[in-house]
Image (tube, helix red, strand yellow):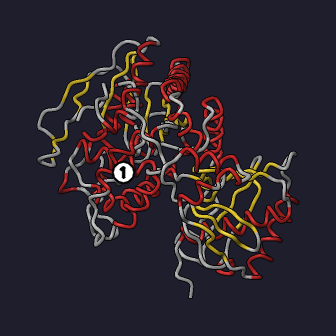
Amino acid sequence: MLDFNPRKYAVTLKLVFLKAVNDVYPEARVEIDHSLNNGTYGTIDLGRNLKEKDLEKINNRMKEIIEKDYEINLICEDNDTLKLKSQKIDREDIRKFLDNSGWTGMMEYEVGGYHDFMYEKPYSSTGVIKLYELTKYNEGFIIKYPLKNANELPPTIDNPKMAKIFQETGRWNSILDVSTIGTLNEKVLNREIGELVRVNEALHHKNLARIADQIVEDERIKLVTIAGPSSSGKTTFSKRLYIHLRASGKNPIVISLDNYYIGRKNVPLDEHGNKDYETIEALDLKLLNENLTDLIAGKEVEIPEYNFISGEREKKGKMMKVPENGLIIIEGIHGLNERLTAAIPKENKFKVYVSCLTQLNIDNHNRIATSDVREIRRIVRDSLARETAAEDTLAMWDSVRRGEEKYIFPYQEDADVLFNSNLVYELGVLKRYAIRELIRIKPDSEYYEEAKRLIKLLYCFVDIDIKYIPDDSILKEFIGDSIFYKY
């Protein structure tokens, strides 16, 4: 019986797919880009548009490779050996990765005469693959594989807005001339990182200004809600958006949803019998909607203040009123859920989804998971801001992810606009902070293997000096010294 491991399954399926493409179209160039629609999106450059029949041929070849149950052989995992022969490798992305990185963790595999480089270990043969789905999507393809057990594919969804954001990020990477770790490290080693940081930050500001303009141009908008998963930089985004709106002549007020918690003793329980602080039922929706309705009507309102130490609201709140030419900004994980602000007409609301969607790959065939970047952000911020050990952050990460899948991701397509908070250079900055915390996790910990995996990824990056990072950068929310976010 297969010892199902979704990471191993994904790597094995990827090798099957890449060999199939190479067998059917030897001159094709494949890029495995990012997660999308509960699968992985990529492109195949054939010198022409990819067609359905091309994927049919590739899919048929994949089935043959799986049926023949080819052995997957490890050829080399020695870093020095791979680096010494880098110039003989006919892929520029692999050469740049090996030449511009220290310890890479790269491994060379062979399957049925086809050679490729993987960053994680596959199963020992191709026959273990029993279930997958390959479909055309936009200009490329999506390949799906089991995530929870070997006999079930994740449900089919369509996230066109998310796809559009990834396309925009791809354009940003073209502007920055960075798409893989090798090209990023090359710029660091060539002392070009300062300009790259400035251009990347300018792209963030340009996007923020565009969002602010959308809000200002529609006089019906009275409420802006901002939501996103953990460690997306929502706090810094909110405060930067506030500044852009002020610069456009608006006078926003900011309301924290934290102040609408119903009280620790009243928080409902989850399916495991634990208090569920993430559920929308933990908020006083009735009071929130009354307050928002009154504020929009021009009334002065007493906004509650929640005391996280006592777990209850203070007896007296804070008086607030929307100023002339003003609007309301609220930030919280339920910002896209229509139930949160049900009393406010849709035409009076503007919803923003903020997430860290990395488009930086290890190489053309090995991507960096978006959730890995957020996990590293969270480890760094927790250690610096809350003195929380990396092991404790990893211990709660699965719960955080379940909450996101339940309360955030289902609503992301309901946003009026999506903002990608990722910075292409950020892992080179976060590296030193994260490794310092991750190496404290001992081999007898259940989180040791996850710590090793993240350390392995971070070691691929050349360190980037924090002196290049502006004090209003979203990254400063995680490493400290932000003008918006104080520890």
Could you say which quadrant of the image residue 447 lies in? bottom left
Question: Against 401, is 412 above or below?
Answer: above
Q: Residue at x 49, y 33 (%)?
A: 345
Q: Residue at x 56, y 22 (%)?
A: 210
SS of the residue under disc 1: helix
Q: Amino acid at mark 1?
A: Ile
Q: Visible in this render: residue 207?
A: yes
Dot 1 alpha-carbon crowd within 10 angstroms: few under 14, some 14 to 19, many 20 or more: some
Could you say which quadrant of the image residue 37 lies in? bottom right
Give the residue number, with chain letter if any, for mark 1.
280
Q: Nearer the viewer, residue 324 or 447?
A: 447
Q: Quadrant of the N terminus?
A: bottom right
Q: Is residue 53 left or right of residue 237?
A: right
Q: Position of residue 371 (x, y in %)?
A: 47, 53
Q: Position of residue 469 (x, y in %)?
A: 40, 28
Q: Is residue 81 left or right of residue 233?
A: right
Question: Against 60, is 27 above or below?
Answer: above
Q: Residue at x 51, y 18 (%)?
A: 216
Q: Residue at x 50, y 51 (%)?
A: 409
Q: Is residue 157 left or right of residue 291?
A: right
Q: Position of residue 182 (x, y in %)?
A: 58, 44
Q: Point out the residue furthest to the bottom here.
A: 1
Q: Nearer the viewer, residue 400 or 176?
A: 176
Q: Position of residue 53 (x, y in %)?
A: 88, 60
